Image (tube, grey):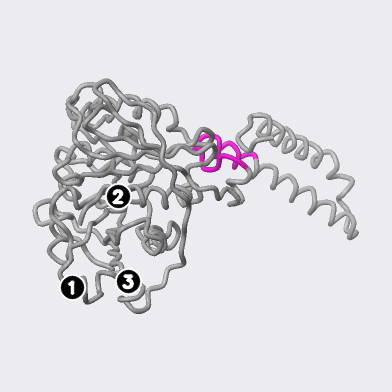
Amino acid sequence: MDLTSKTVLLLTVLVAVALFAFTVLLWPRLAHRTWRAVTGRIGLLLATQLTLFASVGLMVNNAFGFYASWADLFGQETEAGVVVDHPTGRHGTDPGRQGVERTGLPHDNRRAAVAGRLDKVLVRGDDTGITSPAYVYLPPEYFQPQNAHRRFPTAVVLTGYPGTAEALYSKLHYPQTERRLVAKGKMQPTILVMLRPTVAPPRDTECMDIPGGPQTETFFTKELRADIAAHYRTGTEARNWGVIGDSTGGYCALKMTMRHPEAFSTGVALSGYYKAPIDPTTGDLFGGDARLQRENDLLWRQRHLPPPPVNLLVTTSKQGEANYKDTMRFIEGTKSPTEISSIILESGGHNFNTWRREIPPALTWLSSRLSA
């Protein structure tokens, strides 16, 4: 039976209830000081606690979609995603297909000219007043003499909310994956700027310029690009810049690319969503402005606003992701000159294991759309 099956959840709850009742009934018989009685009490308590925790865990997993299957839970889902291009027309998309295979590489931060370099930096926004830590990965080619005057394409890499920037290289292995792809000729050397979208903690700003609040969108689309370009050999045009993220970072990647084609030419959303939530972590994002709220709804933008000339990649899973239906609607609603591609897994939850399967083909696709 599947991990997300209601039958599995029901059986686990019934077992937990039965064990609880069994413990109550047997407790008087086990109220002795013999080793058998003590062992019996320990066994019953342990079994009851385990089934209780399992029931709660299954309910939480079913509600939030962290894991889609037993193989996903135990890290056995390793098949990589495949990029599918969907040629767009005036009224939507048509089918198309392109395959990319999975790769990976352990990170090595020794000599910069051989393994590249990982810099921890502080990005400052003079106008917004936002300051955020970030990690900048510079590929080995950046330090090689023949490239001394070369400018490199750049990708902003975002976590979900709240997320940690360190997870982008320690758990999701973005720099390591890039090195492997470059070595195989599947990706051009690219500067990675890795940070979380939570630049005004603890508030989840959803990468918005909030009326009377943090101007996060301006920070990412203007100040971050300008600050990085002032210190590293990056391009300054939209065709030199892309943005990729998971979950909240995926929504940000799509939204900022669609709203600011002058800043980013390419956006990748891993398990992203298409409308900003309103909850205690976000507060009032729109200040009562209905127009602003509509314009940050990406499905609404597709229906009512002219499509921008950008490249977008979205990912989802048929089993395990809550965004599957919205993602299919987003693909179908994309109109030219926007280009849309997708990675759709058969199974995969909202977790690092799923994203590690999608990152190699996503980086290959992203790199093919950026220019130095």
Q: Residues within 10 Å of mark 1 (few under 14, many from 20)?
A: few
Q: Provide residue 117's location: percent of width, then percent of height.
A: 31, 71
Q: Provide residue 85's location: percent of width, then percent of height.
A: 36, 36
Q: Residues within 10 Å of mark 3 (few under 14, many from 20)?
A: many
Task: Determine the main secondary structure of the stretch shown in magenta.
Answer: helix
Instruction: Measure how far apart labels 1 and 2 are at the Cα level.
Output: 23 Å
Query: Along the line of sight, which residue is nearer the eye, 104 or 65?
Result: 104
Residue 60 appears in the figure: no
Dot 3 falls on a residue whose secondary structure is loop
Per the rendered image, the range of residues in magenta is: 55-69
As drawn, the label of residue 368 is 2
Q: Provide residue 178's location: percent of width, then percent of height.
A: 37, 60
Q: Residues within 10 Å of mark 2 (few under 14, many from 20)?
A: few
Residue 5 appears in the figure: yes
Task: Kindly identify the residue that appears in the image at 28 percent across and 69 percent down.
Answer: 141
Instruction: Measure how far apart labels 1 and 3 are at the Cα level.
Output: 14 Å
Instruction: Measure how far apart labels 3 and 2 are at the Cα level.
Output: 21 Å
Q: Quadrant of the C terminus?
A: bottom left
Assess whether residue 62 is covered by the magenta stretch.
yes
Q: Label 1: which residue? A: 148
Q: Quadrant of the N terminus?
A: top right
Q: Amino acid at mark 2?
A: Ser
Tell which circle, 3 or 2, labels the residue nearer the N-terminal end.
3
Task: Kindly identify the residue that appears in the image at 55 percent across and 42 percent down.
Answer: 67
The image shows residue 367, relative to residue 89, as above or below, that is: below
211 to the left or right of 96:
left
Q: Label 3: which residue? A: 116
Tell which circle, 1 or 3, labels the residue nearer the N-terminal end.
3
As drawn, the label of residue 133 is none
Q: Amino acid at mark 1?
A: Ala
